[in-house]
Amino acid sequence: MTLAGSSNPFVGHRSVGSPTDLVLRGARLVDGRGPRSGTFDVVLRGGRISAIGPDLEADGAETIDATGRWIVPGLMNAHAHLCLDAGPDPEANLRQENRTQTVLRSAARLDAAVRAGVTTIRDVGGPDGIDIELARLVDAGEILGPRVIPSGRVVTMTGGHGWWIGLQADGPDAVRRAARENLRAGARSIKLMATGGMMTGGRQAGQPQLTIEEMSAAVEEAHKRGVPVAAHAESRVGVLNALHAGVDSVEHGHGGDQEAIDLLLQRGAALVPTILSDRRIIDHGVAAGIPDFVVEQCDALHNSLVVFLEAAIAAGVRIAAGNDGGAPLVPIGDIVSELELYVAHGMRPLAALGSATIETAALFGLTDVGLVEEGQVADLLVIDGDPLATLATLRSPRVVIRGGMPVDPLPMPILAAPQRSHAERDGRAAMIVGATAAP
């Protein structure tokens, strides 16, 4: 079966969740370990990669001619909010929805994300355990989407960041119980709020919230179950508190410094930078309808994330790709734009690909995804060019295969930044920092 044009020969042929025996012919292969020399056939059976080699026999398998194209692992997004619509003010929109609307719209976002090439995604907080329910529906083959690693409801202090969709808890015992409630509900990740955030009113971004002792209690409970813990942190104190508590990943990382880098390296923890979210807020601003308090806080904090990310990349810190999908103007499936920013800030393209495959899989505790290798789950993309030459080739996959099932691809649209001078942005940031700095 020859792959041609923009049509997918499998559209309408398979029910959701039905793997297909396939052979992909004549492709070049690359994953986060690097490219293989030569061209190969890749045989998929029972939803896994069963064989890789030249001129393979594949009796009964349907054929896709991938000659001249590249096969890469499906991409992963370590930080997304399925419940948020990526509009200018997603939190306000979520508050106006009823539960049915949120479920249906979140499912539609999952559908769009997998068609864009994201085959695994971690939800890091939403209302009422909806992400856990959606993960089960995807696993059961009842809806189309990436594999979902759900965190359930965020754990936050009373009145803390995300309080209105989270579990509010004060003191180590209460935080321990909140973690246990999420785990009982089916969470496969725990999300803690080490600091305030930009999207919560009251200009709380970066203010320390959950304490080391509180977060340590949640970490202990999660690690008993082999579940990773993520901590939202947007200040130096918040980043350090989270790392001292033993979290597996620092989300965002504004204000991180060399001490934080040393701890990340010592503990093997990952940084999930979500720098795309900052860039979209700063580039589009209030003119796009983003709330002024969000833009002001982001303007004030963004440069500290750039400095930390560049230092972390140079030091060899584990970077797991996450884009804060659902935040203003950041679709959950647009992970490639996040990777391009990593490269702009000093990461090699191969490491960027690894950040959305090998590193994310390790963070999630998944051992059978993230590589183009025999025995791995067949989450694969067929793309037109070498991603190590330009990551943009990942944005428009010719074929998406999720668990051995071909999916009709639908590339993410590119959101261009409006023309706004760096001098204008820098001047605005300087005014905000000057207005909010401590005497």
Image: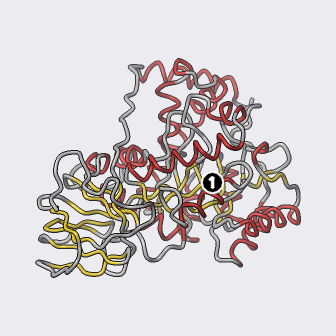
Rendered location of residue 396, percent (x, y): 29, 46
What colour scheme was applied to this rendering of the protein? secondary structure
Question: How packed is label 1: few (under 14 Cα within 10 Å), some, or many (20 or more)?
Answer: many
- 366 to 156, vertically: above or below: below
Amino acid bearing label 1 = Val
* Observer-nearest of 400 and 280: 400
Rendered location of residue 412, percent (x, y): 38, 41
- 201 to 377, vertically: above or below: above
Which secondary structure, mark 1?
loop
Residue drawn 15% across and 80% down? Answer: 56
Determine whether, in the image, residue 375 is placed left or right of residue 238.
left
Count of numbered badges drawn on the protein: 1
Residue drawn 76% across and 62% down? Answer: 215
Which image quarter holds the N terminus? bottom left
Residue annotated with mark 1: 124
Which image quarter holds the C terminus? top right
- 67 to 392, vertically: above or below: below
Rendered location of residue 316, percent (x, y): 43, 63
Determine whether, in the image, residue 184 is placed left or right of residue 276.
right
Q: Quadrant of residue 261?
A: bottom right
Rendered location of residue 260, percent (x, y): 59, 58
Determine whether, in the image, residue 42 is placed left or right of residue 265.
left
Residue drawn 47% across and 49% down? Answer: 111
* Observer-nearest of 381 and 169: 381
